Image (cartoon, rainbow, N blue to C red):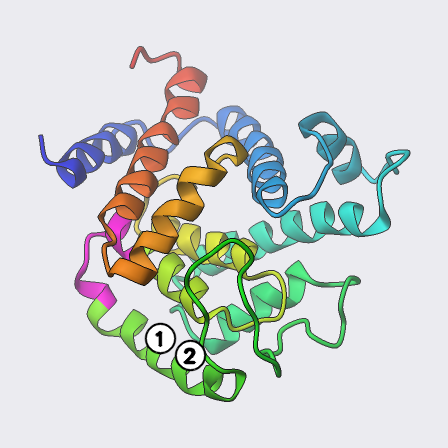
């Protein structure tokens, strides 16, 4: 079965069980907030463990961890909540959306750069791709947003989500927080289309970076689309478990 057809079939199967019981929704939501926050931050080097992230989200300080790491957890949780609001209103992916999410990601961490495009050139450590000159970032972002609202709308939601993530990171419009913001935007597109939020796990970090580099340097998006699609497939598992359905 073609990749996207299989994912569409899983979505249709889940849709048949909607609306989900309130207790199931609440349990899945709590689990999602924790795991999405933990993995997205861990990919970027945050050293809070899954259990420490849970404690930090409850407002308790974890000994031996930096204040920044605590803010990264709280900020990411708040950014997810904004994504959920944007899904409810079917908010189009525009500059306000991108900057609002980024502002939350860097809240209390870097006030000068939160929600503001970078003013200097950057290199991505360990990557062959070099993002555009800082002076060209606004122009690249305008083109990106136009593409999101026009051509990207014609793609299957999973491919669209993967490419939105990739093209955003390719520009690297902010001085920091690009990866977290990209994964938030990816899930915004998936969730607006009715797919579950999808988590790229820290254990996939190497394959994730390699697939992105291949997309940027060889114009071959297939490995990255496949990685995202595999993660989407896995994102249905918590629903089947919560509903007591055998996969």
Q: Is 40 in front, or is 207?
A: 207
Q: Position of residue 204 (x, y in %)?
A: 46, 34
Residue behind mark 1: 144
Name which residue lies at 89% across and 36% down.
Answer: 64
| Left or right of 86 in this view: 66 | right
Name which residue lies at 31% across and 61% down.
Answer: 217
| Left or right of 15 in this view: 109 | right
Tell me which segment is drawn in magenta: 152-160
Q: Is 29 in front, or is 234?
A: 234
Q: Is residue 146 visible?
A: yes
Whether pointer 2 and pointer 1 mark residues with C-beta atoms closer than 8 Å, the reply is yes
Q: Is residue 200 visible?
A: no
* Secondary structure that dominates the magenta span: helix
Q: Position of residue 151 (x, y in %)?
A: 20, 70
For label 2, the crowd category at 10 Å Cα-Cα, with few meaning under 14, some 14 to 19 and many 20 or more, is some
Q: Residue furthest left?
A: 1
Q: Position of residue 247 (x, y in %)?
A: 29, 15
Helix, strand or loop for disc 1:
helix
Q: Quadrant of residue 21?
A: top left
| 158 within the magenta span | yes
Q: Is residue 191 above or below residue 173?
A: above
Name which residue lies at 31% across and 70% down.
Answer: 148
| 87 within the magenta span | no
Helix, strand or loop for disc 2:
helix
Residue behind mark 2: 141
- How far is disc 2 from disc 1 in space, using C-alphas? 5 Å
Name which residue lies at 58% across and 69% down.
Answer: 100
């Amino acid at each position: 079965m073609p990749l996207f057809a299989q994912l569409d079939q899983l979505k249709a199967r889940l849709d048949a069980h909607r609306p989900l019981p309130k207790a199931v929704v609440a349990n899945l939501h709590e689990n999602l907030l924790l795991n999405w926050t933990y993995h997205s931050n861990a990919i970027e080097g945050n050293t809070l463990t899954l259990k420490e992230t849970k404690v930090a989200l409850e407002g308790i300080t974890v000994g031996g961890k930096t204040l920044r790491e605590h803010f990264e957890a709280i900020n990411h949780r708040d950014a997810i909540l904004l994504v959920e609001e944007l899904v409810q209103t079917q908010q189009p992916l525009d500059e306000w959306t991108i900057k609002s999410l980024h502002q939350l990601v860097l809240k209390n961490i870097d006030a000068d750069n939160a929600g503001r495009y970078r003013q200097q050139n950057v290199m991505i450590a360990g990557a062959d791709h070099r993002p555009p000159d800082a002076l060209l970032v606004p122009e690249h972002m305008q083109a990106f947003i136009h593409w999101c609202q026009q051509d990207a709308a014609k793609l299957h939601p999973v491919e669209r989500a993967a490419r939105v993530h990739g093209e955003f990171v390719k520009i690297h419009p902010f001085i920091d927080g690009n990866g977290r913001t990209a994964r938030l935007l990816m899930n915004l597109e998936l969730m607006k289309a009715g797919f579950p939020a999808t988590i790229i796990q820290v254990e996939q970090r190497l394959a994730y970076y390699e697939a992105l580099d291949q997309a940027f340097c060889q114009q071959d998006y297939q490995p990255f689309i496949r990685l995202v699609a595999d993660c989407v497939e896995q994102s249905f598992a918590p629903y089947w478990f919560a509903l007591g359905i055998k996969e």
